[in-house]
Amino acid sequence: MRVDFLTIFPEMFWPALNSGVIGRAVDSGLLDVRVHQLRDYTADKHRKVDDKPYGGGPGMVFRPEPVVIAVEAVRAPGGRVLVMSPQGRPLNDVLARELALESQLVIIAGRYEGYDERIITLTGAEEVSIGDFVLSGGELAALVVVDAAARFLPGVLGSDESALADSFGAGLLEGPQYTRPEVFRGIRVPEVLLSGDHEHVRQWRLEQARLRTLERRRDLLNGGLTAGNDGKE
Ligand code: SAM
């Protein structure tokens, strides 16, 4: 999958893109990432991407010209354009899987008070939110979207890191996990995990996952995270 980020802070991206699972995906070419400076798509000598909002009010907004021109320059045929926004479709496991099927994502990271609405109209960009809070910019949100989606690209997770075993993979939260030592500050690892009985361990994990989901996210047990209930209701 190819990902093109459009931003005024390109330097925020590479530390995250060079690390861990995503770093390996980039190194192996499973993820072809390009980070574009939006100011490179301005025509004035000050490389200005923002201006005052019509009608007054605090702050500045992204001007339409550089953003629309940048999208047109980097979008390949069939590319899907996203713009990060607290007003957008909430990111969840369903959306992450859906995005992983795309050949290209063009992701606009906003700043200031947001962006001129014509950017959405002209590019067909879909607004995506990473939660009900307001960040100072869309860079971290854009990285969250790509991190969540890239885990579903074939080959990105190693054989012992399965997206299906993770929370939401089977519609449940993952249960508790333990590693050495067997006893730490008086707390023992559950006996079943030391038993070597794989079927028993599997059943215990499933039961723990159900219990945890019931306690923390009962909505998931009622089909809360399905394609039909992804925040678009
Ligand atoms: N005035 C905007 C509003 O009330 O909807 C908020 C602008 S915010 C300060 C600046 C940028 O940060 C946004 O354009 C967006 O790109 C990004 N951003 C902020 N919160 C976000 C969230 N929850 N999810 C995704 N992007 C977010």
Image (cartoon, rainbow, N blue to C red):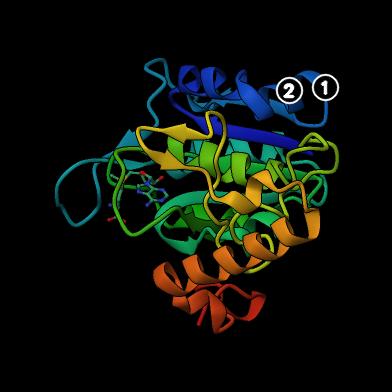
Image position of 106 with respect to 168: above or below: above
**Quadrant of the rendered image containing residue 216:** bottom left
Dot 1 alpha-carbon crowd within 10 angstroms: few under 14, some 14 to 19, many 20 or more: few
- Which residue does the image show at 55% across and 45% down from the upper left? 177
Residue at 61% across, 59% down: 93
Residue 138 seen in the current view: no
Where is residue 39? Give x, y as percent.
Answer: 47, 23
User: Quarter holding the N terminus?
Assistant: top right
* Residue 167 in sight here: yes
- Label 1 CB sits under 8 Å from any ligand 1 atom: no
Please give the name of the residue rendered at 45% of the width and 62% of the height, measured from the top-left corner. Answer: 88
Label 2: element kind? helix
Q: List x then y, in percent, for residue 80.
A: 70, 52
- Cβ atoms under marks 2 and 1 closer than 8 Å: yes
Secondary structure, mark 1, is helix
Q: As shown in the figure, which amino acid type bears the numbered disc 2?
A: Arg
Disc 2/disc 1 C-alpha distance (Å): 6 Å
* Name of the residue lying farthest toward the left: 57
- Could you tell me which residue is drawn at 74 percent across and 50 percent down? 100
Numbered badge on residue 131: none
Left or right: residue 31 versus residue 129 is: right
The location of residue 159, given as percent across then percent down, is 83, 37
Is label 2 within 8 A of ligand 1 (CB to nearest ligand atom)? no
Residue type, mark 1 in image? Ser
In terms of depth relative to the viewer, which is nearer, 18 or 184? 184
Q: Nearer the viewer, residue 100 or 78?
A: 100
| Mark 2, other Cα within 10 Å: few <14 / some 14–19 / many ≥20 | some
Residue named by callout 2 = 24
Give the residue at mark 1.
28
In the rendering, at what x and y percent does residue 183 appear?
46, 34
In the image: residue 51, left or right of residue 115: left
